[in-house]
Amino acid sequence: MDLAKMIQTLKAHHDYPRMGMIASHLGVVRETSLNGGIVKGIEVQFNEDVIKEIVHDTKRLPGIIDVLVETSDGRLKVGDEIMAVVVGGDTREHVFPALIDTVDRIKKHGAKKKEFAAI
């Protein structure tokens, strides 16, 4: 995943002059689970059809011009990149909520994740 390249793609968008903000998310595998346990890695599978639907919905929100998503499937270790999301739009009042909603929806509906505890 290359956030700089994703941002450059948005900057090349024909509606870039309408963008006043580009916001990004880069999810990485952390060494602790939400319950505080030590994690050695995860296995994750993304549903590309669900992600395409979520991106389509996000692009229809007020002020949003484009949305890019990259994901890593399979077994990942601590520090590996899981998902990158970049949202371009007119103002932060539109872009930040769209970014958060997109990430949350993908995590809830477009991904299945299993953590592997350290022994």
Image (tube, rainbow, N blue to C red):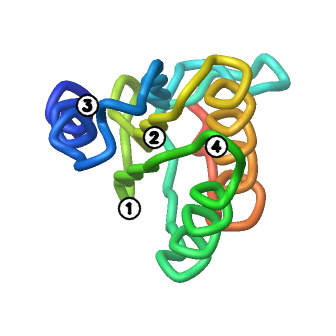
Q: Is residue 66 above or below residue 39?
A: below
Q: Secondary structure at mark 1?
A: loop
The reply to whether callout 4 and callout 2 are in contact (CB within 8 Å) is yes
| Image x and y of residue 94, in percent | 69, 30
Look at the image and tell me whether residue 119 can be seen: no
* Mark 3 or 2, closer to the camera: 3
Amino acid of disc 4 = Val
Q: Which mark is residue 73?
A: 1
State the residue position of label 4.
Answer: 103
Q: Residues within 10 Å of mark 1 (few under 14, many from 20)?
A: some
Q: Nearer the viewer, residue 5 or 64?
A: 64
Separation of residues labelled 4 and 2 (CA atoms): 7 Å
* Mark 1 or 4, closer to the camera: 4
Residue found farthest to the right: 35
Q: Secondary structure at mark 4?
A: helix
Q: Nearer the viewer, residue 70 or 19?
A: 19
